Image (cartoon, coloured by chain):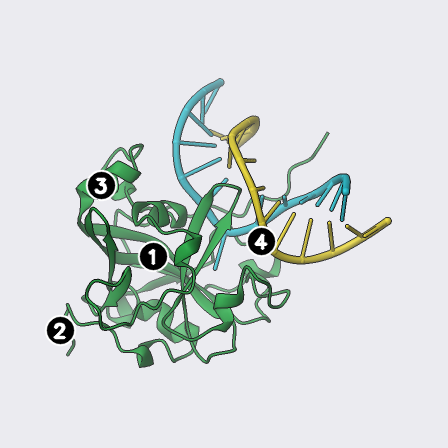
Chain colours: A green, B cyan, C yellow
Amino acid sequence: MYLTDQPLPRTFFDRPVLEVAPDLLGRTLVRNLPDGRVTVRLTEVEAYNGEADPGSHAYRGRTRRNASMYGPPGHTYVYFTYGMWHCVNLVCGPEGFASGVLLRAGEILTGAELVRLRRPTARNDAELARGPARLATALDVDRPLDGTDVCGPDPGAPLRLLAGTPVPRASVEQGPRTGVGGEGALQPWRFWIPGDPSVSPYRAHQGRRRRS
DNA sequence: CTCTCGATGAACT
DNA sequence: GTTCATCGAGAGC
């Protein structure tokens, strides 16, 4: 039995990413900011499973951008995309096997007033961290936080993952990954808490548009 | 060097 | 349903 406010041990992440991903649902991510603390309950995640996964940023091997995916478990992989957004992954084991869990959505537990400063367009609480870039914006996470340890003992660390209230595996729903095209869309490696209002609606991958 | 397009979100029809 | 904001990784030359 976990104490909900205890940090998860690093061994939590030193497992295959497909085991870790559903086990992250219901966990608490803590973000310590200069103006206070935000905590989020994770409600939707996606697994990216090694260099053989065609949907993964590691599919074409190691680059400066994705280096954190090859690093130690229990650290972040934060990437920049579409010229304006950041998204947050948590890296899983074993070290050297490029894997990560994209944090797609969460429910703000505390610090909503701080999140509103950064997410002024959210029309309700459920929208504050619904979608991976929204979640990163809500927590004010960007590239400087790439490679951050989330298993450290310091309660004041920039990011920490606490045990929270895990969701029984049988209660977790699973389906195709959002926004992943081609063969990468085949694997049902998106996991979410059914019925949670903070879970983003499924959007099929947009094929490339015709150009003039 | 140039070119394409992406693990997206917001605004709009 | 559509368009656009906006930039860097990766591929091709």
- Residue kind at label 1, given as amino acid type: Glu
Q: Are marks 4 and 3 in contact (CB under 8 Å)?
A: no
Q: Residue A46, located in which quarter of the rendered image?
A: bottom left
Distance between the alpha carbons at the discs numbered 1 and 3: 16 Å
The percent position of residue A144, horizontal first and vertical second, equals 42, 55
The percent position of residue A184, horizontal first and vertical second, equals 57, 61
| Residue at (45, 80) in percent of width and height | A94
| Residue at (15, 69) in percent of width and height | A4
Provide the residue designation for mark 3. Answer: A125
Q: Residues within 10 Å of mark 1 (few under 14, many from 20)?
A: many
The percent position of residue A123, horizontal first and vertical second, equals 26, 33
- Residue kind at label 3, given as amino acid type: Asp
Q: Residues within 10 Å of mark 2 (few under 14, many from 20)?
A: few
- Residue kind at label 4, given as amino acid type: Gly
- Residue kind at label 2, given as amino acid type: Leu
Which mark is on residue A181? 4
Q: Secondary structure at mark 2?
A: loop
Q: Quadrant of the C terminus of chain A?
A: top right
Provide the residue designation for mark 1. Answer: A44
Q: Secondary structure at mark 4?
A: loop
